[in-house]
Amino acid sequence: MHLDIETPDIEGERVRLMDLGATQLSDGLCQEHGANWFLMQDPEGNEFCICDSVDGT
């Protein structure tokens, strides 16, 4: 399972989650189809994304 966390402030949420133990897997901000996101990993190794938009596809 892969979660996408949608938030208007992806940079602020990235910093907050990293303070809680998450790591950023992407080299930087990813962009595609009008969405921006960071690929992240929680302390247990589960990947998830922090997104500012979800296009529904």
Image (cartoon, rainbow, N blue to C red):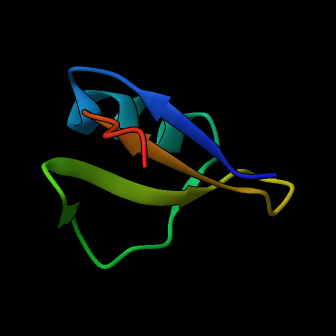
- Compared to 18, does 28 lie above or below? below
x and y, in percent, of residue 6 in the image: 40, 27
Instruction: Name the one closer to the observer, 25 or 16.
Output: 25
- For this orientation, the residue located farthest to the left is 34
**Picture quarter containing residue 54?**
top left
Residue at the farthest front position: 57
Q: Position of residue 3 (x, y in %)?
A: 65, 42
Number of marks: 0
Name which residue lies at 78% across and 57% down.
46
**42 is higher (above) or lower (below) than 54:** below
Quarter of the figure with residue 12: top left
Residue 15, percent across and down?
35, 38
Give the residue furthest to the top: 8
Q: Which residue is nearer to you in this view: 20 or 3?
A: 3
- Height in image: 33 above or below 28? above
Residue 38, above or below 3: below
